[in-house]
Image (cartoon, helix red, strand yellow):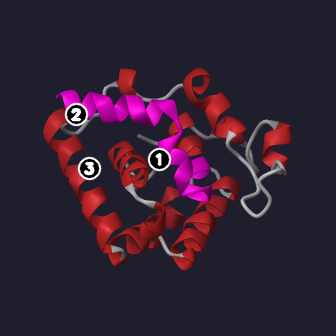
Amino acid sequence: MDKLDDFSQKECFALLLSLSELKSEDLNDDERQKLGEIASKLSVVNNSWEFVREDLLCIISNNQVFNTLYQNQLNRINSQIGNNIPPELLPVESEVGGEIYNYDYDENNSNSVSQSQFRGYFEGHPENRDVLTNLCISVLKSPEKAKKISWIQKIKLFFQRK
């Protein structure tokens, strides 16, 4: 799995699923800012999970609610599908692209739209990043997005049914 480096697809799934379960009050402003910084690093340095993994796991482990949700999701993924995520569970651009870009907005001004939405892609070279990484970048910028993206909801249902 070259594109995600040291951060596995399973960890990305667990991250996205746990963020979709978090309540708004479960993350403080500092944690939100740090998640946004991680997203920015991933946006600038293509597929740089190895550069952000430690910081991301530190944010998760220092937040009891986030850590519990993340560990539960990771355990569920490991027990239900083992080491390899089936390719049919991975997001495809046509499935999540519109949702990723449509939900990019300036949180300080809900009427304004971020520059990335106008361009239709993220900073850096998105064509060199996989869809799962792009999805993580988008959700890390604004964790509330995790509740709105249909692919994440589909994955939640998949693991609940197993």
Element under disc 3 = helix
Q: Where does residue 20 sit, x and y in percent of width and height?
A: 42, 49
Instruction: Give the residue drawn at x 24%, y 34%.
Output: 159
Number of disc labels:
3
Indicate the amino acid at tag 2.
Gln
Q: Quadrant of the C terminus?
A: top left
First of labels 3, 2 by sequence position = 3
Question: What secondary structure is the magenta-colored segment mainly?
Answer: helix
Element under disc 2 = helix
Disc 1 from disc 2: Cα separation: 25 Å
Q: Which mark is residue 160?
A: 2
Magenta residue check for 149: yes
Asked whether the beta carbons under mark 3 and mark 1 sit within 8 Å of each other, the answer is no
Q: Where does residue 102 sit, x and y in percent of width and height?
A: 71, 37
Disc 3 from disc 2: Cα separation: 11 Å
In this rendering, the answer to whether 140 lies above or below 58 is: above
First of labels 3, 1 by sequence position = 1
Q: Where does residue 137 sit, x and y in percent of width and height?
A: 59, 51
**Residue designated by label 1:** 4
**Residue designated by label 3:** 73
Please name which of the two marks, 3 or 2, marks the residue nearer to the observer. 2
Q: Quadrant of the N terminus?
A: top left
Q: Is residue 3 visible?
A: no
Please name which of the two marks, 3 or 1, marks the residue nearer to the observer. 3
Disc 3 from disc 1: Cα separation: 19 Å
Instruction: Give the residue drawn at x 39%, y 28%.
Output: 154
- Relative to 35, 81 lies left or right: left
In this rendering, the answer to whether 82 lies above or below 75 is: above
Instruction: Give the residue drawn at x 60%, y 56%.
Output: 142
**Residue extent of the magenta highlight:** 136-162
Q: Is residue 90 visible?
A: yes
- Relative to 61, 150 lies left or right: right
